[in-house]
Amino acid sequence: MIDKARDDGASVLTGGVAPDTNGFFVLPTVIEASPEMDIARQEIFGPVIVIMPFKSEQEAIGIANGTEFGLVAGGVETPFGGVGLSGFGREKGQEAIFGYVQTRSTTVRIAEAGRTDDSSAE
């Protein structure tokens, strides 16, 4: 994808190459592209971010809405994005925990003041 982005005229500002190690890895990469380029319209899995300059708020909104993916970005604390062909995308943040838990109720009997369990049996 990175090589195709270069071929399409995008600028690789940093990264874009594999580190000197075994496996299929790429160094963290920043690419400047225009909205019509494939790299700007596809979902990328890896340490690659595409930036697209814009001149107005309306242009930025058009760029954001111009893909069929609802791409998600952010850290663990940001559960936003991930709609459309990007799936649910809410795997970030505390809200994600609720998908892995089951609410249960536990009741504990507390003795009344001055009474013990033995005296309540009378």
Image (cartoon, grey):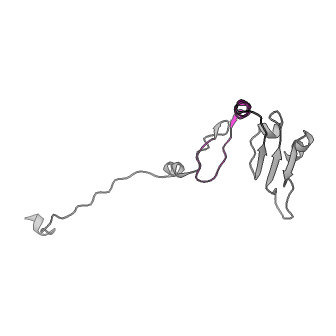
In the displayed structure image, the side of residue 12 where residue 82 appears, left or right: left
Q: Position of residue 17 (x, y in %)?
A: 87, 55
Percent position (x, y) of residue 30?
80, 50
Residue 60 is inside the magenta segment: yes
In this rendered view, identify the residue nearer to me: 4 or 75.
Answer: 75
Residue 111, image x, y percentages: 18, 65
Question: Is 8 left, or right, of 100 in this rendering?
Answer: right
**Residue shown at the point (81%, 40%) measured from the top left:** 39
Location of the N terminus (image quadrant): top right
Q: Is residue 95 above or below residue 85?
A: below
Q: Residue furthest front?
A: 55
Q: Which residues are magenta?
A: 58-81
Residue appearing at x 77%, y 50% in the figure: 48
> Nearest the camera: 93 or 57?
57
Q: Residue at x 32, y 57 (%)?
A: 106
Q: Residue at x 76, y 45 (%)?
A: 44
Toward the left, the furthest residue is 122
Q: Of residues 106 and 14, which is closer to you in this image?
A: 14
| Quadrant of residue 56 within the rendered picture | top right
